[in-house]
Every structure is written in structure tokens, then in C-alpha cells.
Image: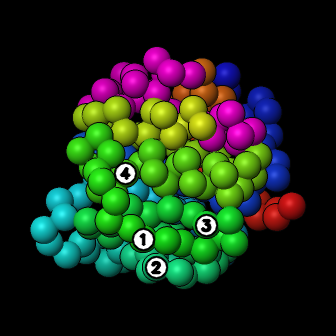
Amino acid sequence: MNDAASSPIRGIEAIVVGASAGGVEALLSVFGGLPKGFGLPIIAVLHLPDERRSQLAEVFARRLALPVVEARDKESIKPGTLYFAGPGYHLSVEHDRSLSLSQEDRVHHSRPSIDYLFESAADAYGAGLLAVLLTGANQDGARGLAQVKRQGGTTVVQEPTEARVAVMPLAALALHTPDHILTLSRIGSLLASLEYSPC
């Protein structure tokens, strides 16, 4: 399904987003229209080199209307907050809706890994999860997105022809048919239309 407006999405409790090459610009485009007071938590993985401190949270906090933080181990997930995975650590969601950091093996040469986040969030939120996969240069996130779909969640893939690097969206499309294939502007509109409605 490509028309996000044709089927209103209800019952979403959390959003997870993954991106790699070209991801900063893509994420700024998607999140830039979210209003102050947006109620859903967003947890994001952007592939980062792990030898240096990330300034992602600071960069996005200056540009967005919602609170932005780098995820901390054992931190409870709060509505209306954007969490970024830090460099060198996988980020996962526990069943008690808290965040967990680990240094387990890399997935698709990446740590943090999008698959790692998506699969854990699918287990924690089930049908209450919306997962978005954007531009990127490897297959990380494709398997996790398919797991979100199997657990009853809603899946969104960036239109590959628009992606700066289409490898990641195309890998996702090769594994499953997402609920929506959308441009960045329409993904942003879709997220902005969601309301916090915990089950």
C-alpha cells in the first residue's frame, strides 16, 4: 500500500527509524515537521563510526521542536522524545519499555544495528510499533522490518528512487511488502498525523 492517507493508522505506541548513508538529511526531513507536543516516542539508529563521540542529539535538538537525547542504558522510554543510538553500542527495547545498550557483535558490519533495534522493539510493542527504513548502503534493517510486520506492526520504506543510496530500501522490499512505500515528505506527514494512543 502506498497511500498513507487511505488507511488511518491507529494504536501506535512507538516509532523506530533506521538509516545509513544519506541518513542525516533524510531524518531531518522526516522529523522536521513534527510539532511541539508530538506524543509518541521515536527511537532511531543512524550508522555511525564508533571511534568518536556522536553529536547527533545536539544537532537534531537545535533543529527540531521535540526533545532529542542520546539513549542511555536502562532509561525508561518517554512519550514525545526522540532517542538516538550512540556510537559503538547496539540499542534495544526491553519488554518493560526501557532502553538497553550492548556491545555484542556487529550486525551487517554495524554497531549500532538497525536490525537489533527493530527486532527488539517488535517483541516489546507488537502491533503498537511503526517502523521506518530510510536510505542506506547495506542490508541492515531489512530483516528487522520484516520481523516488525510478522509481529503485527506497521512498516514504512522510503521510496527507493528518492533515496540517496537505495540499497537499504531495496533490501527491505526484497524480503517483504511494507504497508507503505513513501517519499520523505509523505513519511513526515504520516508521522505527524499519528496520535499517542497506548493500548
- Identify the mark at residue 73; answer none if there is no mark: 2
Q: Residue shown at 13%/68% (left/top)? A: 51
Start-end of magenta stretch: 148-176
Q: Residue shown at 19%/64% (left/top)? A: 50
- Circle 4 residue: 113
Q: Sequence order check: which comes first, mark 1 or mark 3?
A: 3
Q: What residue type is labelled 1?
A: Leu
What is the CA distance from the residue labelled 2 to the residue labelled 1?
Answer: 5 Å
Picture colour scheme: rainbow
Q: Quadrant of residue 151?
A: top right
- Circle 3 residue: 94
Is 41 displayed left or right of 84 in the figure? right
Q: What residue type is labelled 3?
A: Glu
Q: Which amino acid does label 2 sit on?
A: Asp
Q: Residue shown at 66%/29% (left/top)? A: 179
- Circle 1 residue: 101
Q: Sequence order check: which comes first, mark 4 or mark 1?
A: 1
Q: Residue shown at 86%/61% (left/top)? A: 199
Disc 2, disc 3: CB below 8 Å?
no
Residue furthest to the top: 174
Q: Is mark 2 on a helix, strand or loop?
A: loop
Q: Sequence order check: which comes first, mark 2 or mark 3?
A: 2
Residue furthest to the left: 51
Viewer-nearest residue: 152 or 30: 152
